[in-house]
Amino acid sequence: MNYRHHFHAGNFADVMKHALLVQLARALQKKEKGFLYLDTHTGRGAYDLEAAATGDSLARTPEWPEGIGRLWSAARDAENAEATGEKLPASLADYVALVREFDRREGNRALLPRYYPGSPSLIDLIARPQERLMLCERQPAEAAALQENFQFKLGVRVRAGDGYASLRAMLPPPEKRALVLIDPPFEAQDEWAQIVAALKEGLRRFPSGVYAIWYPLTERAKVDFFFAELQALDLPPTLAVELVVNPAALKMKGCGLVIVNPPWQFAGEAETTVKFLARVLAQGAGARGDAIWLVSEK
């Protein structure tokens, strides 16, 4: 799966992942004590949506209008949203407001979005002084862009190199609290195995951390095998949240986020989020959003 994120920024997968990531961070911020945010596959951290219409050599159809574009319109036209029964839940309204804030900060004054924040930019927008961000990126050009985007940010460190290795290097954190996002490009044939190995190491070093793992929904068999491999780790409470926008799609039908040690009451809020997104972001019949416990809370 060759996933050049610059061309996919703001699509349905980003919307789902980033909305839930903001919810996770907000849940951790209910306590005064800060936490480490560790992003293993960060990318460049910020994206120009106008560039999404340009491929390597040919024009291409951008994906953001079917993702953040739909929520952008719903949030802007509150009166219409109420009339259709599709008023944004509080969690999604929070996420869209952050995207708007980032877009304005980058200088866009048009009605449609132009600049889209990656995961670290969203966390940076809401981070308190007691939070610390460690951003890892292996691809040299992306790592250089990431470094440039965050070079003047206090409490943010960029590390060029293997993000999986960062779990060994950075855990356990001195804050004794952590939110870890594992969001690989799924270009390596053994990516699933690398995720399981990295999570095993992370949990060995810091079993109380909150770990969020993004994955594509292409073949159900691969995901079910991934779940089985995870469950063999003797996990703490673990939730899988999935969004399917088009069950008939030949490539990516949807995506999911596995959350190990989800915060209290997160499961219900996440299910509300993805069920709403399934209605608003559907690209075919049978779109759905689900939250499933892989390992139940005790």
Image (cartoon, grey):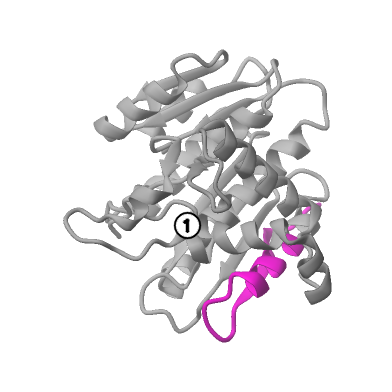
Report x, y in % for residue 40. 44, 35
Report x, y in % for residue 288. 63, 75
Quarter of the figure that contains the N terminus: bottom left
Labels in figure, total: 1
Left or right of 30, for residue 153: left
Type of amino acid under label 1: Tyr
Q: Please tell me whether residue 282 is drawn above or below residue 188 in the rendered image.
A: below
Residue located farthest toward the left when viewing the structure as drawn: 57
| Residue lying at 77% horizontally and 67% vertically, measured from the top left | 81
Asked whether residue 230 is in view, the answer is yes
* Camera-side residue of 189 and 56: 56
Q: Please tell me whether residue 100 is drawn above or below residue 158 in the rendered image.
A: below
Which residues are the magenta region?
A: 271-298
Asked whether residue 229 is in view, the answer is no
| Residue lying at 63% horizontally and 15% vertically, measured from the top left | 174
Report x, y in % for residue 92. 71, 53
| Residue lying at 80% horizontally and 59% vertically, measured from the top left | 268
Secondary structure at numbered mark 1: strand
Question: Looking at the rendering, which quadrant does residue 59 occupy?
Answer: bottom left
Give the residue pinned by disc 1: 215
* Camera-side residue of 22 and 145: 145
Q: Is residue 290 magenta?
A: yes
Q: Please tell me whether residue 245 is drawn above or below residue 211 in the rendered image.
A: below
- Neighbor class of circle 1 (other Cα within 10 Å; few <14, some 14-19, many 20+) is many
* Camera-side residue of 70 and 80: 80
Residue located farthest toward the front when viewing the structure as drawn: 110
Question: Looking at the rendering, which quadrant does residue 42 occupy?
Answer: top left
Report x, y in % for residue 113. 53, 50
